[in-house]
Image: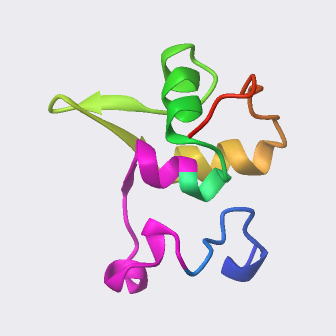
Amino acid sequence: MHAQDSPLTPASTSPASSARSGEKRLFYTLKEAAALLHISPVTYYRGVREGKFPGRKVGGQWRVSRKALHRYAESGESAPSTGGEAA
């Protein structure tokens, strides 16, 4: 699959499209992962805690493996319902 075919192609305002976008990152923050999936950070955090999204604590901070996030996005699994929450 080519980069332009990836379901996680960030929008130009996404955190992942910063000055570091040329480098291949190993991990995302939960906020960055949520932005890539177009959901709120609160929804992503809740999903990680419930085991619905990939993520783990590294040095006291939540991180999401780039490979795990791409695997999840390509699996076709649906994101949990937001229940009408505000971001």
Residue 28 location, x and y as percent?
40, 53
In the image: residue 81, left or right of residue 37: right
Name the residue: 55% across, 43% down.
68
Q: Is residue 32 magenta?
A: yes
In the image: residue 56, left or right of residue 78: left
Q: Is residue 39 magenta?
A: no
Please say whether residue 17 is visible from this viewpoint. Answer: yes
Residue 11 location, x and y as percent?
62, 75
- Vertical order, 4 against 6 (above or below): below
Q: Quadrant of residue 77?
A: top right
Name the residue: 51% across, 50% down.
33
Please say whether residue 54 is visible from this viewpoint. Answer: no
Q: Which residues are magenta?
A: 13-34
Q: Residue furthest top?
A: 50
In the image: residue 18, left or right of residue 60: right
- Vertical order, 35 against 77 (above or below): below
**Quarter of the image containing the C terminus?**
top right
Residue 45 location, x and y as percent?
48, 29
Q: Total marks drawn?
A: 0
Name the residue: 64% across, 23% down.
52
